[in-house]
Amino acid sequence: MPSSTRRFWLLKSEPDCYSIDDLQRDGATFWSGIRNYQARNYMRDDMRQGDGVLFYHSGAEPPCVVGIAEVAREGYGDHTALDPDDDHFDAKATPDTMIWSMVDVRFVKKFTEPVPLATLKATPGLERMVVAQRGSRLSVQPVTDEEWSIVTQLGH
DNA sequence: GCCAACGTTGGC
DNA sequence: GCCAACGTTGGC
């Protein structure tokens, strides 16, 4: 795929842990703590600066897409894996291997209308969206151009 | 709080 | 390499 093509993603976060309001306050943040290989691979290999990100609140009532961010820095080593005091410490990670990767994301906008999961599931064109699939636990997900267009229109 | 779905681990 | 057991995620 040409590097000029902008792609789209969905990042999950529990709002009690890190919410869209936290990102708005911070402006940007490093997306650390991902400890799933598929999610890691997307961040390490596929996410490009400027890619669009749907910010999703999991564990919220209701769970919903709450806004937009963008990739501000492409994949690099997640240093929190090296810190024994960190919740996401991984004894297998070393400064040489790192193992885990993260990206930086920058706040773009908060939706005026959050888009609940139930709406995603009920909206034509979003049937195949990863987050709408039963048992979907992946916290970093690809989003198609069409899905991005529909969801960002729904959210405003 | 329940539990289905999923990813990972480890015995064999 | 299989697969049962386990821990975690996350909707409901």
Image (tube, coloured by chain):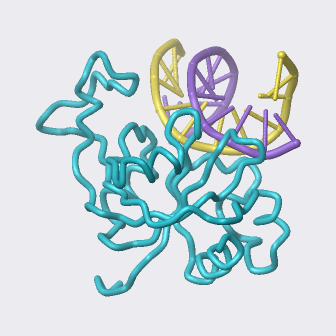
Chain colours: A cyan, B yellow, C purple
Residue A121 vertical position relative to residue A134 in the rendered view, above or below: below
Q: Residue lying furthest left in this view?
A: A96
Residue at x 27%, y 56% (from the top left corner):
A75
Based on the displayed image, in which of its 4 quarters is residue A103 positioned?
Answer: bottom left
Please state if A72 lies on the left or on the right of A66 as rendered: left
Q: Dividing the image into 4 quarters, which one contains the N terminus of chain A?
A: bottom left
Residue at x 72%, y 62% (from the top left corner):
A115
Residue A14 vertical position relative to residue C5 in the rendered view, above or below: below
Please state if A105 lies on the left or on the right of A16 as rendered: left
Based on the displayed image, in which of its 4 quarters is residue B3 positioned?
Answer: top right
Residue A105: where, in percent of width, then height? 36, 57
Residue A59: where, in percent of width, then height? 68, 39
Q: Nearer the viewer, residue A121 or A65?
A: A65
Q: Nearer the viewer, residue C9 or A21?
A: A21
Please state if A92 lies on the left or on the right of A106 as rendered: left
Based on the displayed image, in which of its 4 quarters is residue A121 positioned?
Answer: bottom right
Q: Dividing the image into 4 quarters, which one contains the C terminus of chain A?
A: bottom right
Residue A72: where, in percent of width, then height? 30, 63
Residue A3 vertical position relative to residue B12 in the rendered view, above or below: below
